[in-house]
Amino acid sequence: MRGPIAPPQVPLAASRAEVFADLVQDSVERLERRWPQLADIDFLVLEVPRLDGRGDQAAAWSDEAVPLGGIIPARDGRRARVVVYRRPVEIRTKGRDERAALVHEVVVEQVAELLGLTPETVDPRYGED
């Protein structure tokens, strides 16, 4: 017998990418209560950062550290973007709770950089975990 193990409405059927995107969305929703202007920012999940030297993120990191997230400021009529890199975050975490905490940290740090604030200003509980 072939086919899915679980029906699509069951959480088991969600892909790792979908579960990760949900963690990012949960984090954004937590922050939007305090910062309504986040509704004007696009939040993206990408597998990994680009290495080809193109794009705004390529020059922002060295050989020693793979970024967990990044920002693309608003310009030319495009909205600002916050990017979270799924694979680097997954590699650094063991379980769902640890992954959710790291995702939230990354989102807070990127939002803080984009808004020109400290992470503690964006989320007073930042760094408590």
Image (tube, helix red, strand yellow):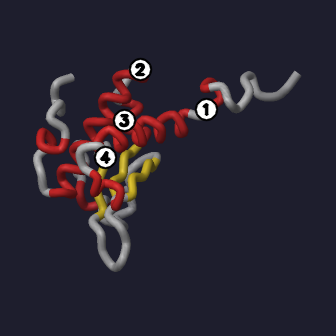
Which residue is located at x 30 percent, y 65 percent? 56
Disc 2: which residue: 95
Of residue 21 and residue 86, the one placed in the foreground of this image is: 21
Distance in Å between CA atoms under marks 2 and 3: 11 Å
Q: Which residue is mark 3?
A: 89
Q: Amino acid at mark 2?
A: Gly
Say above or below: 39 vs 76: above
* Tag 2 and tag 3, C-beta contact below 8 Å: no
Observer-side mark, 2 or 1, equals 1
Q: Secondary structure at mark 4?
A: helix
Q: Which residue is mark 4?
A: 32
Rendering quarter of residue 123 = top left
Question: Which numbered mark, 3 or 1, is in the foreground of this view?
Answer: 1
Distance Cα–Cα, label 4 vs label 2:
25 Å
Q: Residue at x 61, y 32 (%)?
A: 14
Q: Which residue is mark 1?
A: 14
- Amino acid on which disc 3 is placed: Val
Q: Which of disc 1 and disc 3 is earlier in sequence? A: 1
Mark 3, secondary structure of its residue: helix
